[in-house]
Amino acid sequence: MHPIPLLVAMLLLAPAGRIVAQSASPAGRVAAAVTADVLRGHLEFLADDALEGRAPGTRGGELAQKYIASQFRRLGLEPAGDSGSYFQRVPIISLTPTPTLAVSAPAAMPLAWKDDYVLWSMRNEPSVSVRGEVVFVGHGIVAPELSWNDYAGLDAAGKIVVALVNDPGFQDSTMFRGKVLTYYGRWTYKIEEARRQGAAGLLLVHTTESATYPWTTVLSGWTGPQVRLESPPDSLIAAGWLHQKIAVRLFEAGGHDLASLTAAAARKGFTPVPLGIALEGTVRSEIRRTETANVLGRLPGSGALSKEAVLIGGHYDHFGIGAPVNGDSIYNGAEDNASGTAAVLAAAEAFVRSGVRTGRSLVFVGFAAEESGLIGSQALADDPPVPLRDIAAILNLDVMNLHGRTSDISALGLDQSTLGKAFTAAAAAEKLQVTTNQEALLRGTYFRSDHFPLARAGVPGTSIESGSRFVGKPAGYGKEQSDAYVAERYHQPADEILPWFTYDGAVQQLRVIVRTAVSVGNDPAQPQWQATSEFRKAGEARRRSSGT
């Protein structure tokens, strides 16, 4: 084990005094209070071997929770969790599936698990069965703002629907946002819409091009434990993927051509097509229940807006102790995401030390179980610390820049809402230009971190990213470092404290975040979704709501 840094022990005991001169603007005073030493101290503790990789439901995960709560208490933040505590309970259920699936009509045809399909249960039960008529629903999208309804005229109750992944822009760049993936293209959305439509089952047709990952990724992600929040059952019994080759055969069994229907599904006016076949399947699941917790601390606002809140969060969990790689079995998660959790704590410290209070309250969050599928942030969206209508925005910190200073900065989803304007102004105050990560747009990265469950519920949000133009480094340095991280350290034991880490870039990012928080915290109006955003409707409903 590595020794726990002395700085961390000092932080635990040190009073949170006001150390920043009062002559600057409020945003400037908070930004000036962000320090590399505080950030580094928290990071080195959270990524230490002593925390055993911070997996949910483990000793290391609980230590991380208690550390974050102790820091919130030291800073004088109010508890914002359950029953006057800093902790919000997050119940988790894990189901490891063993399925069967077969065509039952017009002629019996068994399918091979893993070769032809994967299937998992959507119920919290050890065994479920699903059977029904199969209907092709195109991309499985209902988007009123785009006059698009792939379920038009269909009563999906009791049926198994088959949908394409991605959205029509994948085939026709004049549709949706062209090659930029919208949330309507994500597999998670397809499940949500199938539920809303009352379908009994959902099967997604896989191609490497449309999914942006190969069938091997499907096998690694959907044949092992399926981890989610415990929730009441609804109509959807099971969901899964079909390999393209078997999807072709199933369509042919009903007298249809997959390629032709795929092309038709990219055109407006598409309507569901019954395939003339029926499927039946079972899923037996090995069930494991556990729980973890989000950690929440509130810095109260001042004035009429204090009942509203701006969230500043990052996930503290990682993968715990796993398969050894080069003799190391602890998945420390230094960059992903001890760095973001440390940044949340450093932001809280900067506000307290600067003495700045925004009109809206600030709620600092350590999210649980992000690596298990955004479970902690979904739990918070389901049971928020203040009513959803009063959450103005979420600023998410996930993988900070530990490679050095940049002349630019990036964040996800800045085009989705007016939050982008506040972020751009904050960056300009730090003499940083905002640039767009095109690869992140194409891959739909906006939908894959802890701001997203809140965005889906109508709360404008963004997640910080590194700039790409590194000061004193050659062009392409940023991409080289990003590629090396993905290839060598991402979700591996090698993601640990490294001697070359530098904190100047992370401090830049965090100063922009706290400036954005001051701007949003003091603005009389909450950020608004853009008219073109797929979350505008949810945002309008959130603001009209009378409760959570």
Image (cartoon, helix red, strand yellow):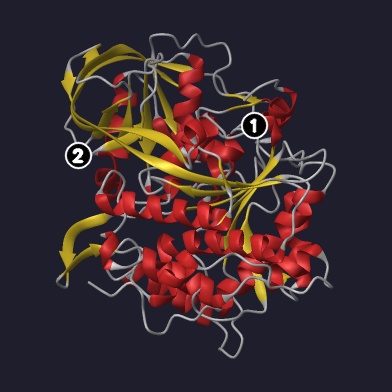
The residue to which callout 2 is attached is 115
Choose the circle earlier in sequence order: 1 or 2: 2
Report which quarter residue 530 is drawn in: top right
Q: Is residue 240 above or below residue 125?
A: below
Q: Amino acid at mark 1?
A: Leu
Q: Residue at x 40, y 56 (%)?
A: 67
Circle 2 Cα neighbour tier, 10 Å, few/some/many (<14 / 14–19 / ≥20): few
Where residue 331 appears, as percent x and y from the top left, is 27, 62
Report which quarter residue 246 is drawn in: top left
Of 92 and 32, which appears nearest the observer? 32
The numbered mark at residue 336 is none
Of 54 and 12, which appears nearest the observer? 12
Q: Residue at x 31, y 46 (%)?
A: 56
Which quarter shows the N terminus?
bottom left
Count of marks overlaid on the render: 2
The residue to which callout 1 is attached is 388
Where residue 533 appears, as percent x and y from the top left, is 69, 40
